[in-house]
Image (cartoon, rainbow, N blue to C red):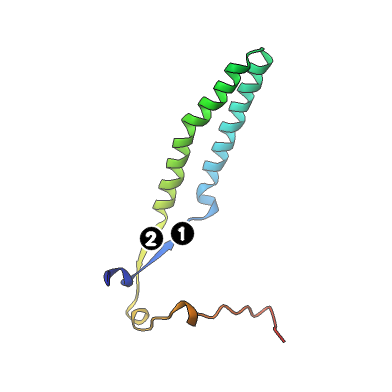
């Protein structure tokens, strides 16, 4: 357990990393809804609901896999420096003051 104290976990994920995945997912949803509306207009509501359900159920695992692998690829273990190891601070010692807000 002492080894884990020598590393800092950092997540470098930004919105830009998953932006393409979100756009792709929205396109899939819109295409499935367009197909459902086309089948509804053809007087086949059972096929319309089945189409939407099938597209969502089949595409959801791929979406989750893409999100999880993107997240895991952006988690880094950074070694702490020698000076950082000697001066350990507890969360209570950290100062979270905001200079823009004056309490007086």
Dot 2: element:
strand
In the rendered image of this protein, does residue 43 appear above or below residue 79? Answer: above
Residue neighbourhood size for the residue with mark 1, other residues' Cα within 10 Å, grouped as few (<14), some (14–19), many (≥20):
few
* Residue at image mark 2: 76
State how far apart marks 2 and 1 are (Cα): 8 Å
Q: Residue at x 52, y 42 (%)?
A: 21
Name the image quarter holding residue 95. bottom right
* Residue at image mark 1: 12
In the rendered image of this protein, does residue 59 appear above or below residue 44? Answer: below
Give whichever of discs 2 and 1 has the lower sequence position. Answer: 1
Q: Residue at x 69, y 79 (%)?
A: 101
Task: Judge from the rendering whether residue 61 lies leftward or rightward of residue 25; answer left or right.
Answer: left
Q: Residue at x 48, y 32 (%)?
A: 59
Residue nearer the viewer, 89 or 46: 46
Name the image quarter holding residue 49. top right
Q: Residue at x 72, y 87 (%)?
A: 104
Do residues under tags 2 and 1 come within 8 Å of each other at their CB atoms? Answer: yes
Dot 1: element:
loop
Residue neighbourhood size for the residue with mark 2, other residues' Cα within 10 Å, grouped as few (<14), some (14–19), many (≥20):
few
Q: Residue furthest front?
A: 46
């Amino acid at each position: 357990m002492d080894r884990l104290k020598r590393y800092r976990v950092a997540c470098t994920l930004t919105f830009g990393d998953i932006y393409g995945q979100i756009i792709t997912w929205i396109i899939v949803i819109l295409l499935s809804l367009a197909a459902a509306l086309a089948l509804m207009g053809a007087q086949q509501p059972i096929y319309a609901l089945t189409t939407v359900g099938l597209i969502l159920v089949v595409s959801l695992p791929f979406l989750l896999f893409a999100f999880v692998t993107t997240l895991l690829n952006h988690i880094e273990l950074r070694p702490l420096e020698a000076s950082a190891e000697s001066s350990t601070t507890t969360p209570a010692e950290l100062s979270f003051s905001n200079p823009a807000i004056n309490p007086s």
